[in-house]
Structures are given as structure tokens and as C-alpha cells.
Amino acid sequence: MSDKCDLCLLGLIIFSSLLTGTGGVNETHEFISSGENVRLPCNNALSDCNSTTWIYNSIRHSAAVELINLGIKKKDTESHERLSLGSDCSLNIKNVTKDDYGSYTCQQFVNDKQQGTDALVFLHVLHVSVSPSSSSSSSSSSSQTEISPGCSVTFSCQLYARFSCDDLVHHEGLKLLWVNQAGVDLKTDSRYQISSDHCIINLTTTLLNEDDNREWRCQLTHRNQLQTSVRYTVKNSADTASETVICVTARTLFRVIVTIVEMAVFAAATVILLQIIWARRAGRKDLQHPEERAMPTVLQ
């Protein structure tokens, strides 16, 4: 247990030095929202990017993944189509996803010998998901979600960080909050239920007709300085051609249940009625030919 605490403390010290700029010129932080493009600087670049190698480390991978080797993009990585090498040897990532978070290392090699020290970039990704989910919603930084008035919906905003995110939020002044278009904290409005657990903050509300085209934003700040944000715009599904909605109202659910019960009762009544008809027909047949039951079968 003490070893785990020591590792957490070490991570906090390193993270604090990075945020305050005392960890060395070759260590930087990048905060980005999912769906956006990001540029990761290579602070040890030489004049020729043919010496540049980029390596990616994440808790999702058991080993480091080489993205760029001596200026050439590797084609066997899952994100290779979204990667490109800038003219200044920076690593460009298009349409960032929550799975892109982690540490990126820029190295320089000349004649198989590394030149200088590593340039380390920590990428942290802010991502919002919607529950119930809808095929019309996306994870981009400026997305539109179709809704039906009267539905209860929850927007979940999470920071995916390289270090222990809970400890970083608690000790380093990182803060998540939901605000409206005017930048006012939605905790001040009683119609919204806000719940948070360090790296996750949830916004739950019942949607109204007047929410059409309304925008909510999840913001990440560090010591009151905005780092990045994710915007969600609500669009009334009645105003669109799509029939996709992200929730079912209680009234609609009640009608569905009543319909199912009525169909079940009708089916059961039909079966019982048929059984009665068959039984009566069988009884009349027996009454019309009683001798057939009494006479034994004669063997010829």
C-alpha cells in the first residue's frame, strides 16, 4: 500500500513540475477535447526531420508503440491514418479520440546514435458521452444531439489523463464544470443535477421545448485558467427529418406496455376460444355416434 502511495506522490510531483514549467524545457502538457486536432511539439528537433522518431506510451498498451521512425510514418499502427509529421517535426493528430491520451516521446537519431535528450509530451483528452445514447450524437468538440422534450438525459464529461486523474484533480487545481452559453456554472440552476467524482462530472436534466438549439459546455480549468472544453448543442428531434431520439418518455413507455398487455390478452383469449370450439365439436361428434364407442372391434 505504501509503495502505491509513493508512486502516486511521485506522479504528483512530476505533474506539478510539468504544469509549473519547472520540469525541464523538453516536457510539456497538452489538453485537448475529443474530436479536435492537436499538434504535439518536438522540442529537441534537428534541422532535418529525417532523424525524428515519435514513440507512444499508454496504459492501454503493454509496450511502447513506435509511430514515426526516422521521419517515416509507421503503417501498422491503429491511428496511422490520423497522424502526420509537421515541417518542424511536431506530431499532428487529427480527430483526437479518448483513446489517444498518454505520453508521446520525440527522439533524434543520427547514424543510429541518439542526439540530445527526449522531448516528452503528455496528452490529456476531455470527452463527453450521452446517456441514453443516440446514433445522431458524436464525440466531437462541437456536436449536436437530437432529443425529445420530456426526456431525462445525462451528459457525462470525463478527463482521460496519463497519471492518476483523481489525485491530479484533487491536488493540482484541475477542475471540471458544466456551464451554459454565457459561461455560468449550471450548479446555480436547480433544474440541473450535477454530480462529480474528480475526473468525471455528470449533468442530468429533463429536456424542455425551449432547450431547442441550447448549448451546454463542459470545461476543464487549471487554477482558474481554461485548458479546453467540449460543447453540446441540443436539437429538438421534431424539427429534423430523422426519427432517432435518445430517450423514451414515461408516457410513451406506458403506451407501449399497455399495447403489449392488450396483445397478450387478445392472444390468450383467442387460444381459449378455439379450445372451447374444438371441445364442443368433439362432444357433438361423440353424441351422434355412441354405438361406435360401445361396439368392440371385430377382427377379420
Image (cartoon, rainbow, N blue to C red):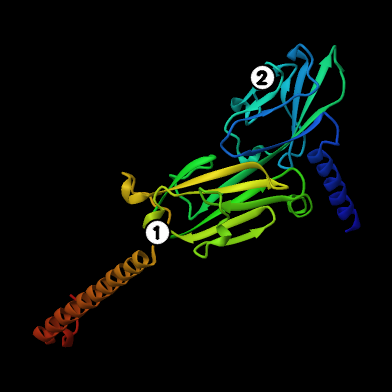
Closer to the camera, 245 or 279? 245
Q: Residue at x 56, y 61 (%)?
A: 188
Instruction: Give the image location of residue 94, x and y in percent.
Output: 59, 29
The answer to which quarter of the image holds residue 293 is bottom left
Q: As displayed, is residue 265 above or below residue 242? A: below
Closer to the camera, 98 or 174? 174
Location of the N terminus (image quadrant): bottom right
Q: As displayed, is residue 299 above or below residue 54? A: below
Residue 257 located left or right of residue 33: left
Q: Is residue 219 visible?
A: yes
- In contact (CB < 8 Å): disc 1 and disc 2: no
**Amino acid, disc 2:** Gly
Tag nearer the camera, 1 or 2 = 1
Residue 195 located left or right of residue 71: left
Residue 208 has which mark?
1
Total labels drawn: 2
Which of disc 2 and disc 1 is earlier in sequence? 2
- Report how far apart the C-alphas of labels 1 and 2 lie in the structure: 46 Å
Q: Is residue 148 visible?
A: no
Instruction: Give the image location of residue 105, x and y in percent.
Output: 78, 29
Q: Residues within 10 Å of mark 2 (few under 14, many from 20)?
A: some
Q: Residue at x 50, y 46 (%)?
A: 232
Residue that mark 2 sits on: 86
Q: As displayed, is residue 82 above or below residue 221? A: above
**Amino acid, disc 1:** Leu
Residue 115 has which mark?
none
Closer to the camera, 37 or 2? 37
Instruction: Give the image location of residue 134, x and y in percent.
Output: 45, 49
Secondary structure found at label 1: loop
Secondary structure found at label 2: loop
